[in-house]
Amino acid sequence: DKAGHRHYMSKEIAEQPDVLANALEYYAGDNEGGQMLEAGVDFSAFDRVVMVACGTASLACLVSKYWVEQIAQMPVDVDIASEFRYREAPLDARTLAVFVSQSGETADTLAALRYATGKAGKVVSVVNALESSIARESDLALPILAGPEIGVASTKAFTCQLAVLASLALQAGRQRGTIDPAQQRLLTDQLRQVPGQVAQALAIAPQIKAVSAQLARYDHVLFLGRGALYPLALEGALKLKEISYIHAEGYASGELKHGPIALIDEEMPVVVLAPHDGMFDKTVSNMQEVMARGGKIVMISDGPGLKDGGDGAWQKVEMPTIDGPFAAIAYAVPVQELAYFTAVEKGTDVDQPRNLAKSVTVE
Ligand code: M6R
């Protein structure tokens, strides 16, 4: 049931404010889920976190690395499961291993979990399907509460994974004493504002649609971001190639001059994710390097950001202004919609892109 939407993907994008509100109520609202986290994971018993997943789920892990390291001062290694499972990575009792999977059946992630079992101090999974192999075989399974996700391109599962991982980061900070009560309150408040910010981001769909009509004419697109927005740039590129078949790459803005800038010309638009945060000036200077070489910039920022850094951009998208470290969650919306509207414009099969399966149960 697509609930009046043309595709499951657009229905699932639109559901995000509701499912996120549920997930955050559960994990960050002092009730059942919060207690389950509290009872289930004691971050003070671990020295580091290893996170393993595939595809979009691995990008959720990468975003949360920024949060856990910053908020809980705890080192986080993120790995893709197909590499981790064969690498003989050292794990010990002071390592918390976290496996993230929407389906809970991804073969590589399951094999990685089995590798970690008995070596890591604790094996936690973050899953959408609680009745799944990955959930069953972990010491603690945390549901992301996104509801069924049908579109092959993961959307609401990604943002719900982020909501759960952000809640875990806050708990880690609390248990390790790296944030004081005032900071805890501020961060919890900021996290609870995410569903509203996502709703505001959904309201700017017409702007994204207009940009997508342009992007559909190109063969290559580059996505740039810094900090927690860097994994979002990777996610933007993954989504675009997955459903529109346009070649796209995501890079950390600061890596631009170490190679990819050689590709810049007017035939490769560059989407820049640039909230007006502490990294903004750096991102803008990377953007200017692109423009100086004839590159076309799609700048996705907020009002202050577009005012301070938007001069010369080819296309501009105005997001709401978001304070704090969780802005990356709302930036998932323009990233998902750019891919969605571009694919619709090109007429590709949005929900069932060629060569892809929803759940990758073979290696
Ligand atoms: O079910 P999982 O979360 O384990 O799936 C992992 C990836 O296969 C998945 O996220 C894939 O990258 C999506 N199609 C991305 O949209």
Image (cartoon, rainbow, N blue to C red):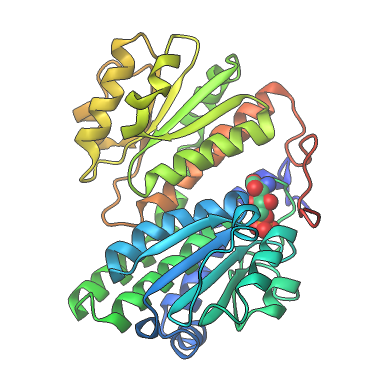
In this rendered view, identify the residue nearer to me: 14 or 115: 115
Residue 183 percent across, percent down from the top left? 21, 72
118 left or right of 235 in image? right
Q: Residue at x 54, y 34 (%)?
A: 237
Q: Residue at x 40, y 42 (%)?
A: 230
Can you say whether 253 is above or below 141 in the image? above
In this rendered view, identify the residue nearer to me: 91 or 63: 91
For the N terminus, the image quarter is: bottom right
Q: Residue at x 28, y 67 (%)?
A: 71
Whether residue 15 is visible: no
Residue 66 percent across, percent down from the top left? 35, 57
Can you say whether 80 is above or below 165 in the image? above
Residue 214 percent across, percent down from the top left? 53, 17
Residue 150 percent across, percent down from the top left? 75, 53
Can you say whether 18 is above or below 208 in the image? below
Can you say whether 312 is above or below 1 in the image? above
In this rendered view, identify the residue nearer to me: 348 or 90: 90
206 left or right of 301 in image? right
Whether residue 236 is visible: yes
Q: Where, by quadrant of the figure, is residue 265 drawn?
A: top left
